[in-house]
Amino acid sequence: MALELQFVALAGFGGLMLVAAFEDLRRLIIPNPLILALCLMWPLYLAAAPSLYGALGALGSAVGVFIAGAFCFSRGWLGGGDVKLLAVATLWAGPSATPALLLLTGILGGVLALFLLMPPGAYIATLARAKLGPSDLAASQGLATPVPYGIAIAGAAVIVVFLPHFH
């Protein structure tokens, strides 16, 4: 029964991370209901192997990442949705996998930024945002190329959270 709950939670986690990545690419926004759903599904994932120490460690790690992310947000280095998504991904990853999550997010984010600077990447991003209104599109473009960092966060989170289940 606990293993089934964990499977349902992992499937939901993967699906919601995919939606978060797509929404960030399309609108440069990670909707709050996605973050809330990920938070509400975490206890199902935890129920398969309940551990007070593990739960408290995951919560502490998530709070630490959120505080560091809030600082980055205040400086304009990260978007608010990215901070929340990274904190909830840390909650799922737990304290032992948080360094791997952060490192992999940075690597994938760098690759994503380089890809978006190339013509095929810029074209894909433009196509994904084609449904936006003219004022929304102008606001999202600015002088710099916006990087939907939620894609990198979601990709790293799925890898880090799913990988231990394939041993």
Image: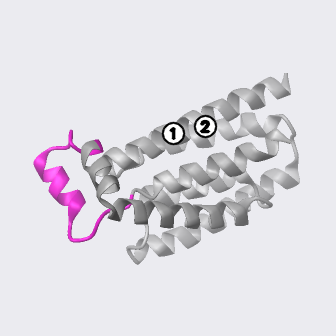
Position above or below: 31 against 47: below
Where residue 83 appears, as percent x and y from the top left, is 50, 61
Q: Position of residue 141 (x, y in %)?
A: 22, 61
Q: Please tell me whether residue 135 belongs to the stretch shown in magenta.
A: yes
Labelled disc at residue 14: 2
Q: Is residue 33 above or below residue 114?
A: above
Q: Residue at x 81, y 35 (%)?
A: 47
Would residue 71 appear left or right of 139 to someone viewing this image? right
Kind of residue indicated by mark 1: Leu
Q: Nearer the viewer, residue 156 or 4?
A: 156
User: Which residue is most to the left?
Assistant: 134
Position of the N terminus by quadrant = top right
Question: Which type of secondary structure does the marked residue at label 1 adopt?
Answer: helix
Q: Is residue 135 left or right of residue 74?
A: left
Label 2: element kind: helix
The answer to whether residue 104 is above or below residue 23 is below
Give the residues drawn in magenta, as a range.
Answer: 128-147
| Image mark for residue 18 | 1
Residue 3 quadrant: top right
Where residue 76 sits, quadrant-wise, is bottom left
Q: Is residue 14 magenta?
A: no
Badges 1 and 2: C-beta atoms under 8 Å apart?
yes
Q: Using the rendered image of the protein, determine whether residue 92 is visible from the camera's viewpoint.
A: no
* Residue 106 rendering spot, x and y as whole percentages: 56, 67
Residue at 84% of width from left, 53% of height from top? Answer: 54
